[in-house]
Amino acid sequence: SSRESIIKTFFAQIYNNIDDLKKLRQSCTDYLKLNPDDNFIENISIVLDALQILRKTKDFKEAHKLVGPIWSNLSKRDNLYIADIFLLNNILFIFPLETAITLKKFSFKQIKKYENFYNLDRLKINFNLNLSLMYIRALEFNSALALIEETINLCKKEQLLIQLSISYIRKGICLKYLNLPEENWIEKGYSILTILEEFDILKQVKEEVLRDSINNADKE
């Protein structure tokens, strides 16, 4: 169905391509015209608006205004659906680091309720990747590295090569700033993406490495 297609496409995103965000947002608009009371798709549309703001203007404050009520509402519930947890993962990085850590702990507590009948390692990987980037940008490289090592093991278990490549790249960044041997982890990550012909993601992670190098140099 169109609803299932929207949800599947939304949760399958690894990096936020602006054209893909616009296309999916239009799908939400078309769907909501016929189903105006579907709160979950409405929440997805709000998140898509926030992600487009970040891609266009990097205005985290404005994006936070949009998604803040979603976290506020879900954080008060005793039980979440799997789809709610996926939704929280997609807004994690819009919040301050301290809030993001709380959000992840809350989500993982909810995840435990589903582990007996649903493979949630992929969801854990996505949470870890989002939070690891936030640790890096906060110069908390030891915390980022610990999270990345855990993620690498999960990626190998699930055979998720794109996420593995991103983990390698971020591991290299952490080792560099901790003055530890880098062992070409960044290049290993680039090589995997090149072999997979994931050139759009490769371009974005290279921009991420450059941006973080500049930002971290400024903070130092």
Image (cartoon, rainbow, N blue to C red):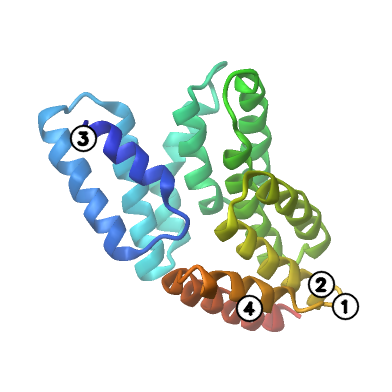
Q: Position of residue 40 (x, y in %)?
A: 33, 30
- Picture quarter containing residue 175? bottom right
- Mark 2, residues whose alpha carbon is within 10 Å: few (<14), some, or many (≥20)? some
Q: Which residue is mark 2?
A: 175
- Indicate which disc, 4 or 2, sits on the residue closer to the N terminus: 2
Give the labeled residue for mark 3: 2
| Contact, mark 2 vs mark 1 (Cβ under 8 Å) | yes
Of callouts 1 and 4, which one flags the residue occurring earlier in the amino acid sequence? 1
Q: Horizontal placement of 200 versus 136: left or right?
A: left
Tags 3 and 2 in contact by the CB under 8 Å rule?
no
Q: Quadrant of residue 205?
A: bottom right
The residue under label 1 is which amino acid type? Pro
Residue ID at (29%, 59%): 20
Circle 4 or circle 2, nearest the eye: 2
In this view, 139 is above or below 4: below
* Mark 3 neighbour density, 10 Å: few (under 14) some (14–19) many (20 or more): few
Q: Is residue 22 left or right of residue 35?
A: right
Q: Which mark is residue 215?
A: 4
Could you tell me which secondary element the residue under label 1 belongs to?
Answer: loop
CA separation, marks 4 and 2? Answer: 17 Å
- Of pointers 3 and 2, the one earlier in the residue sequence: 3
User: Residue 181 has which mark?
Assistant: 1
- C-alpha gap between disc 3 and disc 2: 44 Å
Label 3 vs 1, first from the N-terminus: 3
Q: Decide: marks 3, 1 in contact (CB < 8 A)? A: no
Nearest to N terminus: mark 3 or mark 4: 3
What amino acid does circle 2 point to? Leu
| Mark 4 crowdedness (10 Å alpha carbons): few <14, some 14-19, many ≥20 | some
Q: Position of residue 220 (x, y in %)?
A: 76, 80
